[in-house]
């Protein structure tokens, strides 16, 4: 039994993490901090946790030592406190963007500010088990993942691993996202009357998560185009790329099937009939699966590769718990068994 | 370990039941039948079950003996086959409407047709543990519950049990429902373009589930008014009634708290601040909770009592699994631990 | 051609009013004020008006004289400035709640504060043409209407006018509303991730619009229960009441048909087949219609009367334009011809 | 005053057309046909038209001569009857796909079947006024437009007309669509419970509307990727392409502004602040506008060009009425003045 705490538990990522940790068989949650909701029952903010815990939000200044510390604060905060946090726990998993990039200048290029703890960047493993499973078994520090980056990376990874991608052609990743990505603060455009019914391409290119795709996939000419749609949870990445000359549908099948075999939370969805023939985030709410699919136009090498995830699960807290399992030597799927719902 | 089968597994209730049974620690699923999807993998119809089971839909004519048989067929079928089903399993849980009412003439009054197996009506226990927990420990046959009836019954039950209701006043129960209630067949009004954005009062009174409220609550002058809203899963019942003279808010608090104490899946939601102050089905998708709340106008005795549930869980398959647990002497909450999601 | 200005044009009611006035054949819009968006093009706030007007939001302190002044400010402001506004225009239409109630103490009872211009209350006509058409032809000051009150009033008015209602029984009006009712400010619960998928009974009774139903319908024992659903525009009121002994369905048909005959924007929806058998706000977005329907249980006199409207049209700005037409002696339907969309 | 009839009036395109024609100042609607709803009032199928017309659906076999005949049948029917239709009216506007392509073999390539009236293909003008305005003034036969093709064409047309596009690079057009595109029949995936909350990439490439983009834009290497999202009306096309070397943002501004100047229903949306900075179908329901926007990455020539429309208006019936206006020498915008709603 490991004792864990969460710094920043009133946001959506922190709440989802808390839900997972409260029902994890090997974990006991000690503290969950929140300045804005200090002293309130966590179930008053996360109403799904009513009757599941009597925890109240505690003061981040009064943190006690634990086995594992989860950081779920807004971006830009963890790097200022990582030294003190490292004294509270031997293992840290940070869901924010602060330690996802390995290179300080690359961080500055995408985030605009100088990183304040560059010496820590090399100590962190990028928190996507599908890419760094082996390293995690010995890691003490694991970063979070960008939800959009995760959808993009997992859409590409079977092609990249199998060497099927034509790296001389640009890669366009169209990403459609639900509103929970915007967090509990939101902006004027997050108001239901303004956000409902949207198909809103809010970022044509330049989204920060692009950096994680460049770093992890080793691709250069890649862009993420972000479109908000009317959904709360869920991301679908649709990547347009070219495969190397001669690559055929059967080669891609092999690459995708391998990904599903190696990774307990990866599934390939490519059906000829029924309603659900392609990956869809709709059925993934609460589940840690990443559903992958593809179509290849053999006449010109145009591949459309899709990845659907729940942005709060595989795209954030679910992957964080999966990382914890690997860091602790536990079963990788422990506490992440929920299958998702149909219909929903 | 009990061996179970499901007759009628391609509908929404059957699919939800299968999801729950596949992850239930004490159960092994043997067969799931479907005539229309015979031979298909169950995950082709219920895509959330991909990588969870390799079961295929089997022929209802080829059913084998099991410990528990679940019937999840459309209404009006189980009564024709109950004799043969009873030879296949010592315990039967029927999710349909066929054995919910104890009186054959009452059935005929509400369903229009003569019941074809009236002698079986007295053998079944009504399948809501919150009302019949004790009987279930020795029952072999348990019926399903109407989802709308369940929301109505649980909205009223604290008041009824505490004797607070003025039975001389009419009770109006306004029920708002999501589209999954309509089932996989639907009708022309179920098409997304016609069903999205609706507030559609499709039944002012006379809904069949009214019969279950009359039978279980012992009230006479009660009506259910049904309104479809834009949501897939979820029911909210808002009951308007009068309390007996002198009944005060503190008396109601006592009655509702007692319900939450006695029943592991009942919660009282009545907060003074925060976003989630009243029961809402939104956060209950996939969970077996029934969230209850109330407001009393002490000046005139008008009470508004609310109950929110997931129609496919507490309103159907979740309650069925809870009944199974009680019939088998297992922990009542076993396999029903999912907390629900926030946000969603 | 009348010259008009709008005070408070950046909110939803003000924007809808502006849209209607810009395309009204007898009107020229001179100024639209907004403090928070001063100097911006109105189409930057109301994007549907792009290419329709080059108006910019102007300073409320720099208002010029006009023929008709529309007040579309938040509640509680118009009463402080009504004297000065009355010097700017001979005719004023106020969309806020400030001059809807005729009695200052009744206002205080429902709004909590003393009215600061009680002498003006008797000068205003309540702004629902279906109730006060004749008075409007000579009125200089017309109030707005509460959107929920309008749905409630129009649900009841055929029964009240025909003397069919049993006034000794309580009237319960269940009202379901879209998110545009919350206005451009909203609250933490208005965030899309929290407001999507809701069925949220946010007010069991005591809603301020109740006062308008009491005043206009002459009923005493009436309550409004408010439930938010996932929709942007639209209100459905479902009123539960008792009719007088002996009243039959044919009597109600006569009363409802009379309402539709007398009022160009009232329709009766009570079909035996098809998808749209009852009043639904879904198809009313942008239209000024109020769709009425009913069901009567002749066995016990329980009547369910429904009214669907677009809260921003018939429930606010559409009725205000209709009032203007009547005050100016123009065709009542002028500028309000949009039929609504199907599907939507 | 022109007399017009509609063949096929019970579908969504036909209903929208009827709504527009009923309020068009220069038009009188004589007949609207429907086999499946023969004899019903049109408002029973299109409930927005209640109190607007007493027309009933008539038999297509009993069509009378008119000035203009609109064909709004499912694809593949008009080509079989065009000879007889041409005897009923001197002018025909066909909303279906039958006469959109100018080349019979190109038709066969994309639609799979031989065209049965190839000699008629050259008589038709492609029905997008933004591309063929001049020809329409003398045309007797005008085709419809594919809604997705229209969004794709209008996204590209400013770049194509200005010669800014690098035609040696592939063009990927990601198109997101609402459910009304599926028509009144739908399929099993159109059921609300299955279609709500989707982000479903139902066609990676090969969509038939691609043919219209190839024909009208003169591009060869172009693909349309179709994704269904939770919305009823609306299409957003997001085109990814390369501009010619040296092309700068200011060049694109000039090209897009020219499109908006030349075309009354084209607007450019590219704001630096506010909620609505880019084209969005949300605010276009019922309006005939096409909102265009773009982002250019000057470092690599990657242009993201967006076009938002209402698929039933600019993408079908609105363009058809605009074509009629041009064919008849009327004001191009006549009967198409509705501005759209905010919020919605």
Image: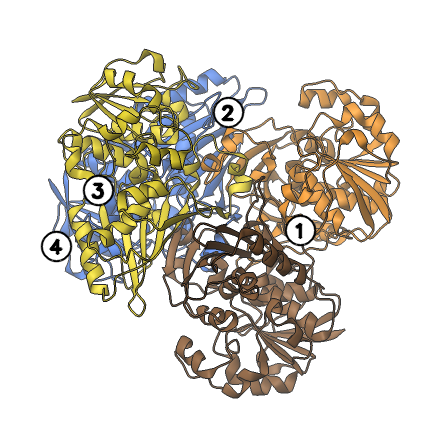
Chain colours: A brown, B orange, C blue, D yellow
Does residue D44 appear to the left or right of C138 in the view shown?
right
The kind of secondary structure element at disc 3 is helix
Camera-side mark, 2 or 1: 1
Q: Tell me which chain the residue with mark 4 is part of.
A: C
- The mark lying in front, picked from 2 and 3, is 3
Residue B118, horizontal then vertical, whole percent:
80, 22
Q: Quadrant of residue B116?
A: top right
Q: Chain ID for label 2?
A: C
Question: Image quadrant of residue C34?
Answer: bottom left
Respond whether the residues carrying marks 2 and 3 are from the same subunit.
no
Q: Which mark is residue A194?
A: none
Residue at horizontal 60 percent and vertical 63 percent from the top? A16
- In this rendering, is residue C314 above or below D28? below
Viewer-proximal residue, A247 or A215?
Answer: A247
**In whole angstroms, how far apart are the C-alphas of marks 1 and 3?**
54 Å
Badge 1 element: loop
How crowded is the residue under tag 2: few (<14 C-alpha within 10 Å), some, or many (20+)? some
Q: Is residue D28 above or below residue D165?
A: above
Q: Which residue is mark 4?
A: C64
Cα separation, mark 4 vs mark 3, equals 45 Å
Q: Are marks 4 and 2 on the same chain?
A: yes
Residue corresponding to mark 1: B287
For numbered disc 2, what is the local secondary structure? strand
Query: SS class of the residue under badge 4?
Result: loop
Residue B104 percent location from the top left of the image? 77, 22
Q: Which residue is mark 2?
A: C295
Q: Chain of mark 1?
A: B
Image-based side of A159 in relation to D100, left or right:
right
């Amino acid at each position: 039994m490991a004792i864990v705490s969460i710094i920043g538990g009133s946001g959506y990522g922190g709440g989802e993490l808390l839900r997972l940790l409260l029902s994890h068989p090997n974990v006991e949650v000690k503290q969950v901090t929140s300045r804005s909701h200090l002293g309130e029952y966590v179930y008053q903010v996360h109403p799904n946790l009513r009757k599941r815990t009597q925890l109240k939000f505690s003061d981040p200044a009064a943190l006690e030592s634990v086995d594992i510390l989860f950081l779920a604060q807004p971006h830009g905060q963890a790097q200022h406190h990582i030294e003190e946090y490292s004294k509270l726990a031997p293992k840290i998993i940070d869901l924010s963007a602060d330690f996802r990039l390995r290179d300080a200048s690359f961080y500055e290029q995408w985030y605009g500010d100088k990183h304040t703890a560059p010496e820590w960047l090399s100590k962190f493993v990028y928190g996507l088990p599908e890419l760094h499973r082996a390293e995690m078994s010995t890691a003490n520090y694991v970063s979070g993942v960008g939800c959009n980056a995760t959808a993009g990376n997992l859409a590409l990874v079977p092609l990249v691993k199998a060497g099927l991608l034509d790296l001389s052609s640009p890669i366009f990743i169209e990403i459609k996202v639900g509103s929970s990505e915007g967090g509990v603060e939101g902006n004027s455009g997050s108001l239901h009357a303004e956000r409902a019914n949207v198909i809103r391409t809010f970022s044509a290119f330049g989204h920060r998560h692009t950096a994680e795709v460049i770093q992890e996939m080793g691709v250069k000419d890649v862009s993420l185009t972000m479109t908000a749609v009317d959904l709360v949870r869920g991301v679908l990445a649709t990547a347009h790329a070219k495969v190397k000359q001669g690559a055929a549908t059967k080669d891609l099948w092999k690459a995708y099937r391998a990904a599903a075999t190696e990774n307990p939370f990866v599934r390939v969805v490519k059906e000829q009939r029924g309603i659900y023939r392609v990956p869809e985030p709709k059925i993934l709410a609460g589940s840690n699966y990443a559903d992958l699919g593809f179509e290849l136009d053999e006449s010109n090498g145009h591949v459309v590769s899709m990845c659907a995830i729940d942005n709060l699960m595989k795209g954030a807290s679910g992957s964080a718990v999966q990382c914890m399992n690997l860091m602790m030597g536990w079963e990788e799927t422990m506490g992440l068994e929920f299958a998702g719902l149909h219909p929903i």
